Image: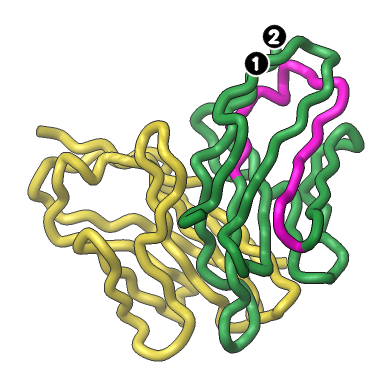
Chain colours: A green, B yellow
Amino acid sequence: GAGVSQSPSNKVTEKGKDVELRCDPISGHTALYWYRQSLGQGLEFLIYFQGNSAPDKSGLPSDRFSAERTGGSVSTLTIQRTQQEDSAVYLCASSLVSGRGGAGVQYFGAGTRLSVL
Amino acid sequence: AQSVTQPDIHITVSEGASLELRCNYSYGATPYLFWYVQSPGQGLQLLLKYFSGDTLVQGIKGFEAEFKRSQSSFNLRKPSVHWSDAAEYFCAVGERSSASKIIFGSGTRLSIRP
């Protein structure tokens, strides 16, 4: 596709249930990021995938959160035993590594709005 | 570790007035610097970026930003704002490393007074 695609766009779940959020990055982008944005807040970094390197999981808030990236493309963010405080917009972004190495311009998806009742 | 500070949580300016949004970063070397805009209910869109070269960077929608190494700043400016500029603005910094990630500031909400 032309841009970063996230699905579903909205997800309502009950407390204690598991959810999976999907991100399709721009084709050929080697870097993929997940962020969480709570209402009226900034972007909270969750996890970063870059090529075949081990992912940077330093932003995951608890062991209920996990993510994988299959085949260097599609990524799934899984939240187990959801809590009400997990309610937020989850944003995915992808980028190329810049020509001189280092972070490139990120292209963002529209996000998944998660509501935990 | 790098960090980004946007000291202004919310700014209101009159339509047609000039705008400056502040961004300060903490990093040991010259970072990659970005400004993104998020309109209500939308994803983030890149306004401009600084990688190297001219420290005054031009972006889309009439925005510009200036990298000042001595002040560790990358402030965003626009000479005359339009009502459509009302949005959330995020400054971000990235390391010059292939294993880097980008860190975002907490954002500045811009409101436009008619």
Measure the alpha-carbon separation of dots 2 and 1: 7 Å
Which stretch appears magenta? A72-91
> What amino acid does circle 1 point to?
Val
Residue at point 68%, 69% (across, down): A30
Q: Are marks 2 and 1 in contact (CB under 8 Å)?
A: yes
Which residue in the rendered view is the most extreme toward the front? A1
Quarter containing the C terminus of chain A = top right
- For residue B1, above or below residue B67: above
- For label 2, the SS is loop
Circle nearer the N terminus (2, 1): 1
Q: What percent of the width, then of the height, locates residue B95?
A: 64, 75
Q: Amino acid at mark 2?
A: Leu
Q: Is residue B80 left or right of residue B31?
A: left
In the figure, B64 relative to B103: above or below?
below
Residue B108 falls in image quadrant: top left
The residue that label 1 is drawn on is A12
